[in-house]
Image (cartoon, rainbow, N blue to C red):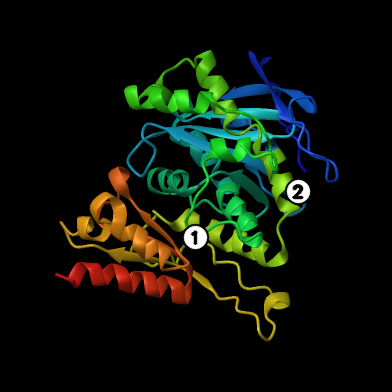
């Protein structure tokens, strides 16, 4: 795994954080005592970032924790900050002070197959990067997807039951820590959506941004040892589909990286593994209410009848589309049920 040692010399950081060290064997999580103190760098120019991040190479492949913050982050909600967690440093990439040039300098890394980006629910982050900076987020390990797959392996849950980041961190299997401040920040963001625009960074902003990424590498290692080969393929393909989800364009994603194919080792007689797709269903104006139903009853019934994930844009939009991710047959079934609600007058 790469370190940040090749970054140019920068002023001594004002902030530090503890990053949990990779777990050893099957030992239970112990993130509080088994951790390393690392610097937090606030980045306003590309030269402050590690060279191996700026220039991805097949000879130097590595994994980082990754997240984005913004003002109601989506295609139109401004991206204000990118967080990067390396094993020996955390970088807060300031999109406000560094501007488009700084974020575009990150484009090769964010699109690279050689750098794995560990993130929790990448859909809105990817949407903001795509529409605001023409960045096609690629090669993510999405911990929300991984959590669902691990529980599916154990027969515990339905596919469309998504875990929050706070609940994931609280799970003793993967981290076992309390992140109560996350809810406090959510309340603060509802009161002041411009929270991430303010400069200079307050101590709370730095702490919150750091906490969103500093556990991700540890969680990654805890999760990967629990995923079988079939689930690893699902993790890769669903991560790619999550990246595309809200990034609707006019060429059916032809300019995006191709989806991971089913491995030959899983193509055996009797294997029910099926290609997975993203389908976008256009909803006529004024008809979304029929799809959702009173208190969400209709869309919940559709979800329960299909082994597919159904996503509605909601207040951030797009307001006239429903996104369906899953095996081909299940996606077609869900799309047919949704279209049936539109025409069933």
Image quadrant occupied by the N terminus: top right
Coordinates of residue 48 in the picture (x, y in percent): 63, 28
Indicate the quadrant where residue 304 lies: bottom left
Q: Which mark is residue 50?
A: none
Instruction: Tell me: residue 161, above or below residue 90.
Output: below
Q: Is residue 288 left or right of residue 152?
A: left
In this picture, residue 96 sits left or right of residue 157 = left
Compared with 232, 190 (above or below) is above
Which quadrant of the figure contains the C terminus?
A: bottom left
Q: CA distance from mark 1 to mark 2?
A: 26 Å
- Which residue, given by chain and number where applicable, does mark 2 sit on? 60
The picture places residue 225, in percent across and down from the top left corner, at: 76, 53
Structural crowding at the residue carrying mark 1, measured as other residues with C-alpha within 10 Å and reported as few (<14), some (14–19) or many (≥20): many
- Residue found at x 51% / y 41%: 164
Circle 2 SS class: loop
Callout 1–callout 2 Cβ contact below 8 Å: no
Residue at (41, 68) in percent of width and height = 305
Q: Which mark is nearer the camera, 1 or 2?
A: 1
The answer to whether residue 158 is above or below residue 179 is: below
Question: Where is residue 84 drawn, in percent x and y?
Answer: 61, 35
Q: Nearer the viewer, residue 131 or 181?
A: 181
Query: From where the camera sits, is residue 44 visible?
Result: no
Q: Residue at x 44, y 35 (%)?
A: 100
Left or right for 323, reference 105: left
**Which residue occupies 34% across, 27% down?**
190
- Residue under label 1: 241
């Amino acid at each position: 795994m790469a370190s940040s040692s090749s970054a140019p010399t920068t002023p001594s950081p004002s902030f530090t954080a503890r990053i949990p060290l990779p777990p050893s064997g099957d030992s239970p999580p112990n993130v509080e005592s088994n951790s390393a103190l690392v610097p937090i760098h606030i980045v306003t120019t590309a030269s402050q970032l590690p060279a191996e991040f700026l220039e991805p190479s097949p000879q130097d492949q590595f994994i980082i924790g990754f997240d984005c913050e913004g003002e109601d982050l989506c295609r139109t909600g401004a991206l204000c900050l990118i967080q990067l967690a390396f094993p020996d440093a955390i970088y807060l990439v300031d999109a406000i002070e560094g501007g488009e040039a700084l974020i575009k300098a990150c484009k090769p890394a964010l699109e690279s197959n050689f750098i794995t980006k560990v993130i929790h629910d990448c859909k809105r982050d990817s949407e903001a990067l795509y529409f605001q900076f023409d960045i096609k987020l690629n090669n993510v390990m999405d911990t929300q997807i991984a959590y669902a797959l691990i529980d599916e392996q154990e027969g515990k849950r339905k596919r469309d039951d998504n875990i929050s980041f706070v609940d994931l961190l609280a799970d003793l299997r993967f981290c076992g820590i309390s992140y109560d401040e996350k809810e406090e920040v959510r309340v603060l963001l509802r009161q002041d959506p411009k929270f991430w625009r303010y400069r200079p960074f307050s101590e709370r902003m730095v702490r919150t941004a750091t906490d969103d990424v500093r556990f991700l590498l540890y969680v990654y290692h805890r999760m990967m040892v629990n995923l079988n080969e079939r689930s690893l393929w699902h993790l890769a393909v669903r991560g790619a589909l999550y990246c595309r989800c809200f990034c609707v364009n006019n060429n059916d994603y032809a300019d995006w990286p191709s989806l991971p194919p089913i491995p030959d080792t899983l193509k055996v007689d009797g294997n029910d593994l099926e290609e997975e797709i993203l389908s976008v269903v256009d909803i006529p104006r004024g008809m979304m209410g029929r799809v959702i139903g009173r208190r969400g009853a209709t869309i919940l019934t559709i979800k329960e009848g299909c082994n597919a994930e159904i996503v509605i844009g909601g207040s951030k939009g797009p307001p006239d589309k429903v996104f369906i991710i899953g095996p081909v047959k299940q996606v077609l079934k869900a799309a047919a049920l949704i279209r049936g609600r539109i025409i069933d007058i």
